[in-house]
Image (cartoon, helix red, strand yellow):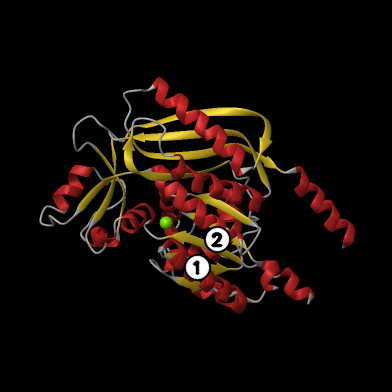
Amino acid sequence: MSLYAETRIVLAVDLDYFYAQCEEIRNPEIKGKPVVICVYSGRTVDSGAVSTANYVARSLGVRSGIPIILAKRLLAKHPEARFLPMDREFYESVSERIMQILRYHSSKIEQVSIDEAYLDVSENTRGDFAVAEKIATEIKSEILEKELLTCSVGVGSNKLISKMAVDAKKPDGLTTILPSQVHQFLDPLLVGKLFGIGTKTEKKLGDLGIKTIGDLANYDVDELSEEFGPNLGPLLKRLAQGIDDDPVKERETEQLSRIVTLKHDADGFDFASEITPLCKDISNRLVAYGLVCKSIGILVITTELKTKNRSKTLDAPTNSEVRIESVASELFQLFFREENETLARRVGIRVSSLTKTESLKKDASLTEFFS
Ligand SMILES: [Mg+2]
């Protein structure tokens, strides 16, 4: 029992080719075609860089970060290829719903980016890796069922191992590395694959004759200290041995939003019925997280794909659906009076300045009282 209590288990969840996969869900007929999500700089029609590509495009050589012009050249013989502008708001709304799914499986969750999170499941699994793998499977099928999206999960005894595990098999992967398998998993990998090692450090290690993670794990720690300093030297060796004590850090949710494509483009606030479900969903999520918001905002995405915002700070924080909807309606009316040339294609609601509800604090103290 005491042994189990000390075994940590961390899941790393990574949503596969996230932006491109979001576009595939919104528009299923592009699935199976090369899909490239672009960040246009706006200077010329095609200037800018590739943000994400789906696996079909990747198999044809398209990579994140390459110029759009190069991607177009690579896909010149594929007229079915789709080049789409990045729609961050939409991806954020999908991401937020998925993070909410993850929260059902552990309250200890660290969201690293829009498409990555760590979950500490030590407590709910009591250190049992078989249980952790079952949770990982449930997470994968729940995300697929509810959001139609695949993800990859790594299961390990800390963040480093779970991150290395998730990277080992993508897309739609599930990789578990038991504590007894850490060395045989890490040792043969090139040292540049070790999480946190950049190309500069990799080169320096190479100069010392260190090619694999195993080489680094077995290297003399004093020599590493001499080369990299008294902190980084020993740290590199520990990482190569798969040791990582960095806790899963819960981060506060900063904002929640939902966005919708209107049934008809609008030049005035005549879509009240379409924002009701958004307000309801945001209110439900605030209640589920035990949060209230002090600021309510709206966003309007125009037919020219420009995003415009308005927001209002409240006198008293709220999580009430009715209050969110009334403030949002007021902001939309004001918006269309001020911007009477604007034609809205998509609209959204965003709440921010989030804090814990007082009642939740009370509940927590009650729980302490009864335990
Ligand atoms: Mg990803």
Q: Is residue 294 above or below residue 68?
A: above
The C terminus is located in which quarter? bottom right
Dot 2 amino acid type: Ile
**Residue at 16% over, 54% down:** 75
Q: Residue 101: which disc?
A: 2
* Of 282 and 193, the residue lying toward us: 282
CB contact under 8 Å: marks 1 and 2:
yes
Q: Quadrant of ligand 1?
A: bottom left
In terms of image quadrants, where is residue 67? Answer: top left
* Of 270 and 44, the residue lying toward us: 270
Around disc 2, counting alpha carbons within 10 Å, would you say few (fewer than 14), some (14 to 19), or many (20 or more)? some
The residue to which callout 1 is attached is 142
- Give coordinates of residue 300: x percent, y percent: 40, 34
Asked if the beta carbon under badge 1 is closer than 8 A to the nearest atom of ligand 1, the reply is no
Q: Is residue 268 above or below residue 57?
A: above
Dot 1 amino acid type: Glu
